Amino acid sequence: MKLKSLMLLTTGAALAVTSAHAQEMADSMTLVSWGGAYQTSQQRAYSEPYAEMNEGLEIIWDESSPEAVARMRAMDEAGNVTWDVVDVVASDAIRLCDEGLAMEIDHDEMLAPGDDGSTPTEDFGDLIVSDCFIPQIVYSTTAGYRTDVEEWNGNTPSDICAIFDLENFPGQRTLERRPINNLEWALLCSGVAMEDLYDTLETEEGIEQAFAMLDTIRDETIWWNSAAEAIQALADGEAVIGSTYNGRLFSAIEEQDQPIAMLWDAQVFDLDGWVIPEGLPEDRLARAMDFIYFATDTQRLADQAAYISYGPARASSAPLVGTHADLGIEMAPHMPTDPANAERTILFNYLWWADYRDDLDARFQAWLAQ
Amino acid sequence: MSDATGPDQFTGATPDNAIRNAERSDGPMLAADGRPLKRSLARALRAQKMRALMLIAPLLVFILVTFIAPIVDMLFRSVENQIVSETLPRTVVALEEWDPSDVPDNATFAALAYDFMAAAERREHTRLGSRLNYETTGISSLFRQTGRSVDDVGEEYAEQFIALNAAWEEPETWATLMGAASWVEENSGEVEGAGTLFQLSPTARDAFPEAADAYRSFARTIQSEDDDSPMAEEPWNTVYLALYRDLSAGYATEYDGPMAELIAEAIPAVADFEGMTPREAFEAIDEEWMNLQIWGTIEAFSDPFTAGYFLTSVDLQLTPQGVEQQPEEQRIYRLLFWRTLFMSGVITISCILLAYPIAYLLSNLPTRSSNLLLILVLLPFWTSLLVRTSAWKVLLQQQGVINDILVWIGLVADDARLALINNQLGTIIAMTHILLPFMILPMFSVMKTIPPSYVRAAKSLGATNWTAFWRVYFPQSIPGIGAGCILVFILAIGYYITPELVGGRTGTFISNRIAFHISSSLNWGLAAALGSILLAVVLILYWLYDRIVGIDNVKLG
């Protein structure tokens, strides 16, 4: 199912701005993203205005981000890179950078300065987690619960540990079928302090402690592979509480009016952004860089937040976040970065997981399968 | 032929003569014209064969390119491991002498410094790091961290060389010292870009074995990576380290090539140089380099080919001490292989049980009604796999249609709804339904060909309905069952999307792990090894099937 949406955006407005390099830039560009509401938000905030400025530019969207790493490696081996700008999560960007498949970026040289005058490196701050990564949004993996569960006798979960509390909050759970996030929450709820999570997970006892906690809900959990499954389980009442991406929960709650509520406690921040494949020909690279410069400036990142509840990666964009384009509601309170939502958060530890992922994943899958 | 029949009157190429010739000689049988029969037959057939081959050539090429080549590539990937010896060539050689009970010596660490510096410049060290991290946790970050700091290794020696004589700072000094005379001539003066490929002078190679090697690696790397000329770039600190090691080891005492006076000046001076040994330098970068397990892993995976992926595929692991079991909590693949086989078997059997009556009915009804039924069988077959799988989700889940009905008629209590999905049962139900047409169709086409008169004859001879079916009809329908079994079982064993969606915790197959390693963990070698094992299992089962049932007994129509 390779859904390739081809958009010919030719009729441009008269205010087309031709930059100095326009002549050397390729007149077609392949953008890779995740499809769905997220890609739509990118189209509306980035590519449509960009196409208006660049008459005759053909923008092709490819919904292949879920398998981007494997596809980029295959393209590299075949010596035929067909993608120009690729949207990936931060951990994939690190992996692509490690493999030499993504281009190293000089953020200060290649990106627009912030509207408040800050340099890109200051504006993005810690979110530049890899030399190849151009941050775009902050999203979080967080919990949601159904608001109509009779067995809960009117109680509502107030922290993440409700997931492990079968006594007060009976019913099926839904969690992602991978160790990341689940092990952190399990440790947190078995009494480990937030700042000791990863140190504890490096020890055999720590891992056992986390798995022991997960053991208590293993058979009561629907383990999902794609975030849509989690939303579907919550919406159907198959699960009463579970984790998924905050944007998905937002759309289920606000756009589809499901009886679900957010549980922001101990949400895990993660990043999504662009990478540029290594080895692009000059004209395509110039086009990709020109698009990136435009699409990651302060205003554009803030614009995207009007279509989806993911926080812009630039600090300077935060004050510009307005209302939802269709629903008209204020978006700021729905952002994972909103102070009220971010009282207790876990920042996804990319480098730690890059080391431990293979072993813990094998162990997690073995634990699940038995 | 006896003498009594008399000599043949005819001479020359006659069939009789040919036979006589053949009987007389001990050599190969000859054709009538005296040439060996084999050769003239072959010649006659060759033209025909060529024509036939030309006709099938497009298909043959297609199969080679799209089917055989990927399989060969997969088999190759499952053992290929050149990345270690290509990225750390000197280290791998140095490790051959290593005593695994102690941290490697300075020579090995120096080799590591030269290798790592070049790898870091070419951005290959992180790739190797993630490769080795599959085997030992922590190597990925160790390599990333080392890549950031490795250009400091040898810095003190570089400073001391330069303090001794500022000429050591000049790129041209090094290029003249190390380059072959012809190369130096070609590249001196103003050179655009990288210049011609660096050539090492044989004198320098003999005089400074380590430094010459390190310099060549530096020169070629900057030429290919940065498009810079060695004439214009100061060498890496590791090259100074190498020269220091060469000179302290007593090389180059009689050196008389270019820059001989510089070397003569340096030889007595190096004895007073101070600085960290390579081993200390790496320890300063990261103490993990003193960890024997890291070195054991590098050593164990230094061969260009490895059985490591296959061992991991069966829950074993390659360690410096030999082959060992994986820790118990990480064993998963044997379980998954067994589960895949077991569930595919269960699915095949449930398909037989469901398909047989349907196929029987289809083949015995009048054509008009059987055609209608056949369409009902084919309709789901033509529906998208994803749609059918998702439909089962709606039906089987705890708040789904089937559970709702069961609760409504009171068979099941509301708080004890059946778990029909996200487990093995869910996978078996959904896959049985999805694969059912592959069982019905071959059965149907075989049953169509069984003449009804046989059963009638059996009954007229006094057989009961059951005996007539079991002794007369059933044996004739076995080829259809055989064909259906092969189809369903082989399809089931490699199934991916349905177990992924409805299998939950206990109903996933080995193919789901293969997909994970291809698209997510990027461990393609392991995925290839798992795939190869799956292929081998299918071939073995096919062979067994041929021995037991006989592949000639299989009919698809």
Image (cartoon, helix red, strand yellow):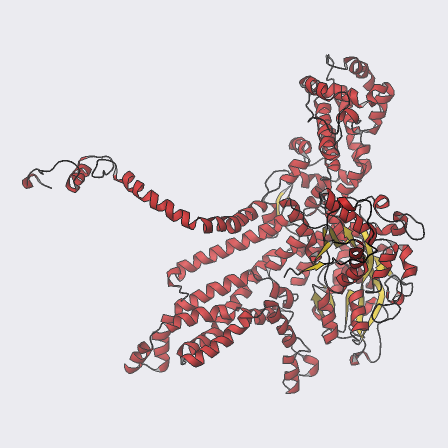
Q: Is residue B224 above or below residue B489?
A: above
Please state the horizontal and vertical placement of residue B492, each as a whole percent of the image.
Answer: 54, 63
Q: Can residue A146 be seen in this view?
A: yes
Residue at far bottom of view? B409
Left or right of B6: which side holds B142? right
Please state the horizontal and vertical placement of residue B2, each as a whole percent of the image.
Answer: 9, 40
Residue A335 sits in quarter: bottom right
Please state the horizontal and vertical placement of residue A154, each as a whole percent of the image.
Answer: 84, 79
Q: In this view, does B26 lie above or below A348?
A: above
Q: Quadrant of the N terminus of chain A?
A: bottom right
Q: Is residue B316 visible?
A: no
Between B61 and B237, the one lying in front of the other is B61
Residue at 44% across / 56% down in the picture?
B543
Residue at far front of view? A14
Residue at 69% across / 57% down in the picture?
A64
Residue A315 sits in quarter: bottom right
Left or right of B361: which side holds B132? right
Please state the horizontal and vertical placement of residue A80, each as a whole percent of the image.
Answer: 65, 46
Q: Quadrant of the C terminus of chain A?
A: bottom right
Residue at 73% across / 44% down in the picture?
A283
Left or right of B365: which side holds A266? right
Give the number of marks: 0
Q: In this view, does B414 lie above or below A119?
A: below
